[in-house]
Amino acid sequence: MNNVLLEDRIYVTQPLLPELSEFNEHLKDIWDSKCLTNMGSKHNELESKLREVLKVPYVSLFNNGTIALLTAIKAMDLPYGSEVITTPFTFAATPHCISWNGLKPVFCDIEPETMTIDANKIEDLITPNTSAILGVHVYGFPCDVYKIEKIAKKYNLKVIYDAAHAFSTEIDGKGIGTFGDISMFSFHATKLFNTVEGGCLTYNNPDLVNKIYNLRNFGIRSEELVEDVGINGKLDEIRSVIGLLNLKLYSDEQEKRAIIKDYYDSKLSRIKGIKIPKMPENTTDSYQYYPIIIEEEFPISRNELYEKFKAFNIFTRKYFYPICTDYECYKNNPSVKPFDLPVVNDYKNKVLCLPYYGTLKLDELDFICGIIEDV
Ligand code: T4K
């Protein structure tokens, strides 16, 4: 490996963008109609197309994934102050949405294969105050949805999924957003499918349609009727257009990422001390992230490898370090004892997400793999 600094920085991801000319054509429609937001025609078209893509009966669009998750939890009508069992191996938004709803996050360890909430450890955390389980399909790896469903039925708990990383993922041929009571997808710029900022909720229960419509729109049903205590979660027309155009591009992007994944797999699986987590056989990959686990046998630590990449202008990411139970606001939570969360406290120092987007070139991939091989 020669000691060159790459001219162009390589990031963990690059956003999927439609042709500017095509975007401009749609902008003209919006300019002509003068309808910019409040559930306009582009918004409604995107909502109905997403129902097909995500294979779910109901979709409600939102202006970002965090507001969508906040609303999902609110829509479950959980008793104020009750406990929600969740994972610390996620983005800050997940437990923050629980807390903003006046509920208490209770952190459960993760299981080592999928890095999702360990369904075998959930029952130990259930108390008379538990009202829900909030699982995260981290990197698109699915939670054990069947086991979680059984536990939820047994204890009469609601199930909410943070599917921010799992766009278009299917489990046993079913859209991942059909599991549990409600799921949230993020359409942030860094996501496989993006609307710049944005997100959606998916659910099977028709009773939630009006409820979520109201919660997303200040509780306003009509000009003279305010039915609920809502917020502003609306996705505007301009970003809905980006979504409509990116819907035509995302599967091509997935195909490109599948090739990159095969390339990484073939090069890196030969290296002692590098573990590549595998998608379960009954699940399709969303191709959102490419995480690797740097085991003790590898000559340098995850942090050293991260710094080595950085020295070459390659910006990998330690998703998720620190974990949520390391944050000042959660570290004194009674469920947070490192000896109760051994797996996640081990993984937080070992996972590294490599650059993963369709426009990565072969020589760049070679360069990235070469850095690891040279170590
Ligand atoms: N739940 C989970 C499990 C999540 O992962 C997230 C968001 C949420 C909930 C909340 O959903 P949203 O409310 O965001 O819809 C990024 C994203 O901002 C965040 O959406 C995402 N998860 C999280 C995992 O990653 P950062 O702080 O890593 O973003 P940033 O700005 O460092 O971007 C990463 C790289 O992407 C950059 O180094 C370069 C590239 N990039 C980024 C942006 C924003 C671009 O090339 N262009 C861009 O415009 O949080």
Image (cartoon, rainbow, N blue to C red):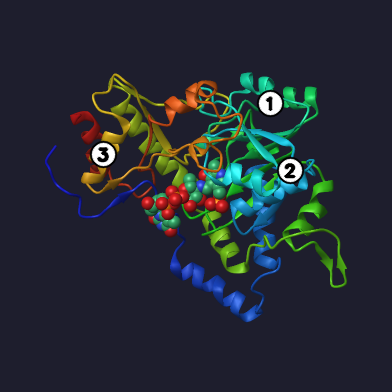
Residue at image mark 2: 203
Residue 363 sits in quarter: top left
Q: Earlier in the sequence, mark 2 or mark 3?
A: 2
Q: Residues within 10 Å of mark 2 (few under 14, many from 20)?
A: many
- Give how far across and how far down residue 86 sits, in percent: 62, 33
Quarter of the image containing the N terminus? top left
Q: Give how far apart the Cα atoms at labels 1 and 2 are.
A: 16 Å
| Residue located 58% across and 42% down the image | 168
Q: Amino acid at mark 1?
A: Ile
Q: Earlier in the sequence, mark 1 or mark 2?
A: 1
Q: Earlier in the sequence, mark 3 or mark 1?
A: 1
Q: Is residue 62 above or below residue 296?
A: below
Q: For this rendering, which residue is in front, 277 or 325?
A: 325
Q: Amino acid at mark 2?
A: Tyr
Q: Is residue 107 visible?
A: yes
Residue 128 sits in quarter: top right
Furthest residue to the left? 2
Q: Amino acid at mark 3?
A: Ile
Q: Which mark is residue 148?
A: 1
Element assignment for label 1: helix
Q: For this rendering, which residue is in front, 298 or 32?
A: 298
| Residue located 73% across and 23% down the image | 151
Q: Is residue 46 above or below residue 237?
A: above
Q: Give how far apart the Cα atoms at labels 2 and 3 are.
A: 40 Å
| Residue located 53% across and 32% down the image | 141
Residue at image mark 3: 368
- Give how far across and how far down residue 264 sits, in percent: 33, 33
- Give how far across and how far down residue 329 sits, in percent: 55, 43
- Give how far across and how far down residue 150 sits, in percent: 74, 22
Quarter of the image containing the C terminus? top left
